[in-house]
Amino acid sequence: MTIYLTRFKCFSIIIMLLLLAGCSKKLTVTEGNKGLVVFPPPPDTTRIQFLTSISNSLDVSGKRSSFLKYVLGEEPGKPIRKPYGIEIHKEKIYICDSMLPGLEIINLQQKEFDYFTPTGLGQLKKPLNCALDDKDNLYIADAGRKQVLHFNDQGIFQSEMAAEDLEKPTDVLVYQDKLWVCDLEAHQIKVFDLSDFNLLFNFPDTLRHQPQYLFSPTNIAAFGDKIYVTDTGDARIKIFDTNGKYLSRTGGFGKQPGKFVRPKGVAVDNSGLLYVVDAAFENIQIFDQNANLLMYFGNQIKGPGQMWLPAGVALDKINLDYFQQYVYNGFDLKHLIFVTNQYGPAKINIYGFVHPKPKVK
């Protein structure tokens, strides 16, 4: 009897060690095929490399070994369902998922993937976009509740915007100690004091026939003293200063490069380049500070790197090390580009903005 107990204990220890080994956290995001996917294609100089994609918690935490699959079965993981907005804050990725409804939060440092689905007064209905401040407070634009909800750094619900202040928020931005909110049904950007959420001002206050009018403001970004607003209803990006003064616009309905059909997410990098998602073209177009189109990427390929009804875009320079393993050794990685896909096999595409390394003579 003692011999059998001893063998059982040894077997239990072996199983425990294997379980611990199988649960070791390793970032194993989907690599796709072995070939490079780059934009623009050769012989033009490469500027964008598709790196990898994330669609499931297993793409972050790692999959079970063959032995553990035999002992415990296949692990299903937690899927990303229908992502819309995306925000990168420090080492975390925040993904607004309208079908959850809630957020997927990926901690790159800890290799963790969690659902954020608050209950009670903080319950979400249709979260579209989110933003965080320097104290890690989380602000979520919920089009279903028609409110912006505030959670502290522990994910505990704090408050919501007053019902009379917003009609249908679609995006939220923390910038210059203010909270900037796209209000689609009010056709305005509404600006609140970040400390007490009092409404400071809104813009534009204009008529439909004027160029600065916002037919359907859906997304917002900022750089320097400029605020960039996606007007999906007018197929343009409209640019204002931080006081709400109208400056210019770019785009317009059309099929040719430089035009849009259904623009959504918008972002600006540290050099002032403007990135615009088009859900209809299923691509991203990049413009310089003078609204000149530089390039586009996404829709001319099939397979890894393809976009499927993209919605959100976020840029990041902090977490380069986590994705360096996917970068072609002939490229220097400058920053990361995260794109959400509402459909298709790849829910989050990750691209690198790269520069070719100088050739050694």
Image: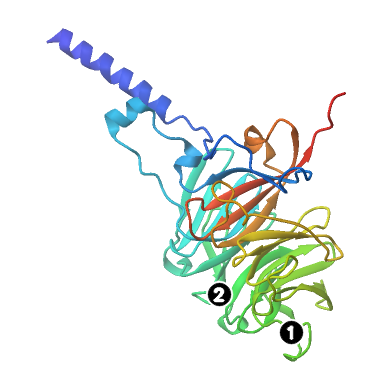
In the rendered view, tell whether residue 269 sits above or below residue 359. below
Q: Residue at x 49, y 69 (%)?
A: 126
Q: Quadrant of the N terminus?
A: top left
Foreground pick, 298 / 270: 298
Q: Residues within 10 Å of mark 2 (few under 14, many from 20)?
A: many
Foreground pick, 286 / 314: 286
- Identity of the residue furthest to the top in this view: 3
In the rendered view, tell whether residue 294 sits above or below residue 235. above
- In the rendered structure, the answer to whether residue 179 lies left or right of residue 169 reads right
Image coords of residue 342 (percent x, y): 51, 61
Residue 295 position by quadrant: bottom right
Image coords of residue 305 (percent x, y): 59, 48
The Cα atoms of the two marked residues, 1 and 2, are separated by 23 Å
Local SS, label 2: strand
Foreground pick, 15 / 290: 290
- Identity of the residue furthest to the front in this view: 43
Image coords of residue 327 (percent x, y): 67, 36
Residue corresponding to mark 1:
213
Residue corresponding to mark 2:
147
In the rendered view, tell whether residue 217 sits above or below residue 12. below
Local SS, label 1: loop
Mark before the other along the chain sequence, 1 or 2:
2
Task: Work out whether residue 43 can be spotted.
Answer: yes
Q: Residue at x 29, y 29 (%)?
A: 70
Residue 252 position by quadrant: bottom right
